[in-house]
Image (tube, coloured by chain):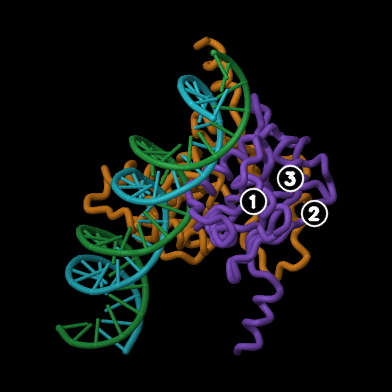
Chain colours: A orange, B purple, C cyan, D green
Amino acid sequence: MKTAVEHLEQYGIRPSIQRTAVMNYLLKNRTHPTADEIYSALEKDIPRLSRTTIYNTLHLLYEHGAILVLNIDPSTTHFDGYTHPHAHFYCTKCGKVHDIEFDDAQFIERNRPRNAHTLTDAQLYYRGICDKCAEAEKVAQ
Amino acid sequence: MKTAVEHLEQYGIRPSIQRTAVMNYLLKNRTHPTADEIYSALEKDIPRLSRTTIYNTLHLLYEHGAILVLNIDPSTTHFDGYTHPHAHFYCTKCGKVHDIEFDDAQFIERNRPRNAHTLTDAQLYYRGICDKCAEAEKVAQ
DNA sequence: ATTTAGTTTTGTAATCATTACAACATTAAA
DNA sequence: TTTAATGTTGTAATGATTACAAAACTAAAT
């Protein structure tokens, strides 16, 4: 598995302590964390870490294509260090974001907008209630 | 073309003045407006209209499946009165949201998450720069 | 008509994720 | 070692959205 530093360099990003930590967190934690979750996890190890740095870094990584930005949760942005084309499922009960692999890898490319000069991003989102939450609901009744 | 009132009733929503106005605006204006754009357009005709009503109404319409909620623009939510399955393209330069029809209507359903108990929503989003903005950029140089 | 209960709308005040910005710190180049 | 460029920090705004309670409206029942 590639290191966070190698990842950053591959996308032309200079690997500072903070950037490496954010990239590493996203590679190790496939949970689609929010900026705040990343901040909370990293501030333990990096004293004087600023939330602004987390936001700056996430923007930078996104600009360089090193991560995905998910606007699947209306209340906050989630981030994904796994950039291979795949879809996401957001459970509106537990708030978790799940990965979905799709069968037709060409679908997204085949349906790209005709009037798009440049494409930076393509995302397929599902929203609903996951089995686990539906089960918990049933038991509670 | 169905009227806004008919639309609301079809989804089991009581057609108040405000709800009808919002539904009608979304049916007539296929521009994917924001809550604020809807508010600005309607306050001219409906005195004492409240922004809260716009938000309440949009939530209600969404809950009943009468409209789509688009989280394609990171800075604000857009709404779509056209609920037939289709994708969207957001130009990050001009901020416009464009409709995209896709070729394989079954794709979304075929790739639905395995661990989804209930699905309320499925959206395919593209982001980039539209031809118009790219052209304007070129001319400016 | 009038009362009553239920529903809908309104206005104001929060909330909270994100951004703006300027000072400070660090790194790279000269 | 100076200088310039880049990166980080902290605080203060921003602004879309929500919370909430009062007021207005609607429909049904008396």
Q: Nearer the viewer, mark 2 or mark 1?
A: 1
Q: Quadrant of residue B35?
A: bottom right
Residue at 60% across / 70% down in the picture? B94
Image spot of residue C20 (x, y percent):
36, 69
* Left or right placement of residue B38 versus residue A21 in this view: right
Front residue of A74 and B38: B38
Which chain does the numbered disc 3 sit on? B
Q: Quadrant of residue D18?
A: top left
Which chain does the numbered disc 2 sit on? B
**Residue type, numbered disc 3:** Thr
Q: Earlier in the sequence, mark 3 or mark 2?
A: 3
**Residue type, numbered disc 2:** Glu
* Left or right placement of residue A123 versus residue B51 in this view: right
Within 10 Å of disc 3 (Cα), the crowding (few <14, some 14-19, many 20+) is few
Image spot of residue A79 (x, y percent):
49, 48
Cα–Cα gap, marks 2 and 1: 27 Å
Residue B21's disc number: 1
Front residue of A92 and D25: D25
Image spot of residue C10 (x, y percent):
45, 48
Residue at 46% across / 50% down in the picture? A3
Q: Earlier in the sequence, mark 2 or mark 1?
A: 1
Are the residues tagged 1 and 3 within 8 Å (C-beta)?
no
Residue B83's disc number: 3
Q: Give the residue number, with chain letter if any, for mark 2.
A: B101
